[in-house]
Amino acid sequence: MGKISSLLIALATLGLMFLAGCDRKPADGPKEVRWDRDFCESCRMLLSDRHYAAQILDAKGKYHLFDDPGEMLLAFATKYNKDPAAKLYVTDSKSGKWLNARSASYTSGHLTPMGFGYGSIEKPEPDSINFTTLLNLLLAGESGAPTPQNHNTMSGSHNMPEADKHPHMQH
């Protein structure tokens, strides 16, 4: 009787563990970043700038962290094949609040961790661009980083000379 009781208890325990796992909700929303502890998937630097972090939540429920919105968008376009099921998040370059990357607006002229130069903002501004425009600019190798010509205005030109384009975007 002792062996049967132990077996029943073990089966009941496994059943409860299975049910608890099934009741778990899938990942949703941005992951809480452990600043200065979590690494960028692309460059392996620590995520430390709360105004330029980004992340992808893929269709399998796995998070991928990045220290620059430009890095995340290039990974989304290349490594993740622009997966429409992926959820993309960026931090607002002014407040540090997490935003949906697809509905955020972007401005150039920022000093971002990897030098892509684009910052995310919650609401459109006169010189801002949308997600699709930014993705196309990055895929074309355009940098939004400040240059000596636009550094004072902090609104970068999208028509950069080849020498000013970000090295990650060189073909």
Image: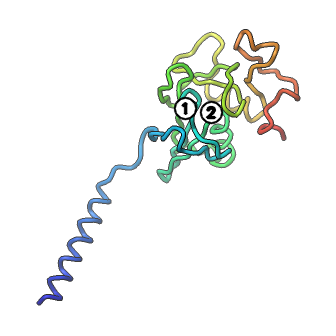
Residue 169 percent location from the top left of the image = 78, 37
Instruction: Tell me which residue sits at (43%, 38%) in the image.
Output: 29
User: Is disc 2 surrounded by few (<14), some (14 to 19) or many (20+) residues within 10 Å?
Assistant: many
For the residue labelled by badge 2, is the local secondary structure a helix, a strand or a loop? helix
Instruction: Tell me which residue sits at (54%, 37%) in the image.
Output: 88
Instruction: Tell me which residue sits at (66%, 49%) in the image.
Output: 79
User: Which is nearer the N-term, disc 2 or disc 1?
Assistant: 2
Tag count: 2
Q: Which residue is mark 1?
A: 90
User: Is disc 1 surrounded by few (<14), some (14 to 19) or many (20+) residues within 10 Å?
Assistant: many
Residue 138 percent location from the top left of the image = 73, 32
Q: How is the image coloured?
A: rainbow
Q: Is residue 25 above or below residue 142?
A: below
User: Residue 66 falls in which quadrant of the image?
Assistant: top right
Q: Residue furthest left?
A: 1
Q: Amino acid at mark 1?
A: Val
Task: Give yes or no for contact between labels 2 and 1 (Cβ–Cβ under 8 Å).
Answer: yes
Left or right side of 42 for 85: left
Q: Amino acid at mark 2?
A: Pro
Q: Which residue is mark 2?
A: 69
Residue 163 percent location from the top left of the image = 88, 28
Q: Is residue 57 above or below residue 153?
A: below
User: Residue 45 falls in which quadrant of the image?
Assistant: top right
